[in-house]
Amino acid sequence: MPTLYDLPSLYDAVVTPGPCEPFYRRLACSTGGPILELACGTGRLTIPLALDGHEVVGLDASYPMIRAARAKADKSRAKVEFVVGDMRRFDLGRSFSMVIVSCNSLAHLTANEDIVECLSRIARHLVPGGLLAFDVVNPNMRDLAQCGNTAERSNTKPDRSFVSGSKELIAYDPVQQVQILKWRFEELGRKIPPVALMRLRAFFPQEMPLRLALVGLELAARYGDFSGGHFTGCSPNQIYVARAARTSRISSLNAHAST
């Protein structure tokens, strides 16, 4: 059974642009390029960043998504380098002023070792003082305790066909902090064949600053929404900006050894 990420046209129909893209584009203006976007999908953010004048690399584990992103970039004449790769194991041999992981994409890493590996790879790819910016959902304990809630999303495509999607939380493992979700889709009342179940990690507010510190990243800001609102327990999102050390750890050790 295919995943949602094997079907880029369906993905684009039900996961439409929102407030996160303007947030990251504004933030990118403060750092400049080069910029790396992990889990870039079909280029919903990557391409606008390139059109803003930044040097951008987009990485995604799904070849169909990367293929669609390349076609969209060609159509818009955006200069972007797209790479098929795993955000737990990537090694691009270069550094970036900013790394972005948008749209709750980090939640696809459900195992602790995978989260650590991804954040460590990001830290190694940042220039001294570079920024990591990402967002994850702020868990709603009531929803997690009462599986069966459904969130509706829909979109009307330019050809006026109508695709609706529903996402249902069918199970939650409180020990592993993993949610199991089922997507259902319809187009003009016709059911679209199902996609594979989706597993997403739930990140709680106190754990993320510790995870960043463990890989040498300093928390610079945390917001509760994409307008920069203060983070509270009722915020829909956890939006993080973390900074790499301005002096590399190796340089610091060498300087200490010479004194």
Image (cartoon, grey):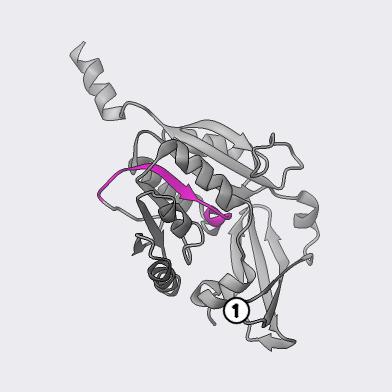
Instruction: Tell me where the magenta segment starts and ends, as one range.
Output: 93-107
Give, as a three-letter code, the residue at label 1. Answer: Val
Work out whether residue 68 or residue 174 is closer to the camera in this orientation and state it: 68
Residue beneath the point at 51% across and 72% down: 5
Q: Front-most of 192 and 256?
A: 192
Q: Where is residue 4 in the image (x, y as percent from the top left)?
A: 56, 73
The picture places residue 176, in percent across and down from the top left corner, at: 61, 54
Residue 11, quarter of picture: bottom right
Please indicate, yes or no, whether residue 14 appears anywhere in the rendered image: yes
**Residue marked by disc 1:** 195
Q: Residue at x 54, y 56 (%)?
A: 105
Q: Is residue 105 above or below residue 31?
A: below
- Give the left or right position of residue 229, taking residue 26 as reference: right
Q: Element at badge 1?
A: loop
Q: Is residue 47 above or below residue 248?
A: below
Q: Nearer the viewer, residue 93 or 58?
A: 58
Residue extending farthest top: 259
Answer yes or no: is residue 132 visible: no
